[in-house]
Amino acid sequence: MEVIINVKRFDGKKVWYQEYRLDVEERTTIVEVLMEIQSHIDPTLSFRVQCRAAICGTCGVKINGEHHVLACKTKVKDYIKDGKIAVEPLSNMNVIKDLVTDHGQFLNKIKDVKGWFEPVKDFQPVYPEDLQKFGKETDCILCGVCHSVCPAFEMDRDFGGPINFVKVFRFWKDKNDALKDERIVLAEKNHITSCVHCKYCSFYCPKQIPVEQDIMQIEFYGKQKGIIKKEPGGGFSTPFGF
Ligand code: SF4
Ligand code: SF4
Ligand code: FES
């Protein structure tokens, strides 16, 4: 079938939408369409792609202005409206060119919560039941989809962001991590309570990580321990009243 692909372009100075017409099959993905355009129609189009298997986290884009997805995991046919589909860069980060965004904006934040493993001296054996406590969070591919969809940045530019709190959760739940409750202190310093619990991060995460639930658990524990003093929820309500 023939489809019109409307791509949001940016050349460093101006923004415009460019229309491309091409034939797609049932199985054609967004990334395949972008590669076809770049190879055979318009070599000036820029986008990111590496693994094409939902593993590297590099190909995040926004579809039809509202769906934040991995381009390599998303079929064109599922998003066609009246024969058209719009492809735009992810939100909440600067655009470098066309669909290429600055991932540094969320990757650099990870150091604010020490988002890495700090091993204890007396390392304990690890069993499958230990791994289950943070198995989903280990799957994070740093794609930035949750960062893109998160409305909390509009209210608080210093909000640490969903990725940071996935990292906090992953290491806080690891019995061989030395930081323990210091991780909750870091979450508090990174404004975890500015999360408005809209659940968009959990809904759009391509790895089905329960991001919002993780944030709730950290906040609940932090409140009980007296580490988190501010009321969770950012003091704002979402369209869904969460
Ligand atoms: S639940 Fe919290 S972290 Fe997730 S998208 Fe909503 S505001 Fe952002
Ligand atoms: S939590 Fe999910 S959406 Fe967010 S960066 Fe990790 S894999 Fe991507
Ligand atoms: S190209 Fe690697 S996740 Fe899409």
Image (cartoon, rainbow, N blue to C red):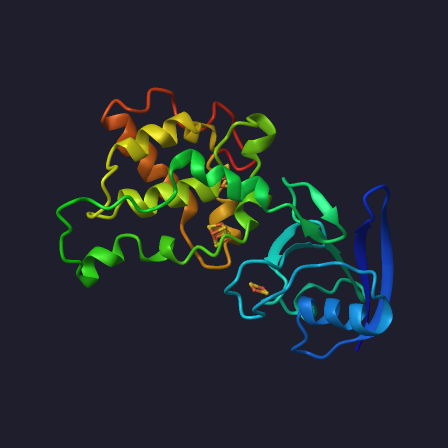
222 left or right of 126 in image: right
**Whole-percent x, y for residue 135 in the image:** 32, 57
The picture places residue 76, in percent across and down from the top left corner, at: 69, 68
Residue drawn at point x = 81 percent, y = 44 percent? 12
The residue at the far top in this view is 229
Looking at this rendering, what residue extends furthest in the front direction? 121
The residue positioned 29% from the left and 29% from the top of the image is 222
Q: Residue at x 28, y 26 (%)?
A: 223
| Residue 123 image offset from top left, x and y in percent | 15, 51
Q: Give 172 or 198, whichever is nearer the viewer.
A: 172
Closest to the observer, 228 or 55: 55
Residue 206 vertical position relative to residue 145 in the rendered view, above or below: below
Asked whether the viewer can see residue 100, the reply is: yes
**In screen coordinates, is 186 left or right of 235?**
left
Q: Position of residue 179 (x, y in %)?
A: 26, 37
Number of numbered discs: 0
Residue 81 in which image quadrant: bottom right
Q: Quadrant of the N terminus?
A: bottom right
On the question of residue 213 being in view, the answer is no
Q: Is residue 138 left or right of residue 29?
A: left
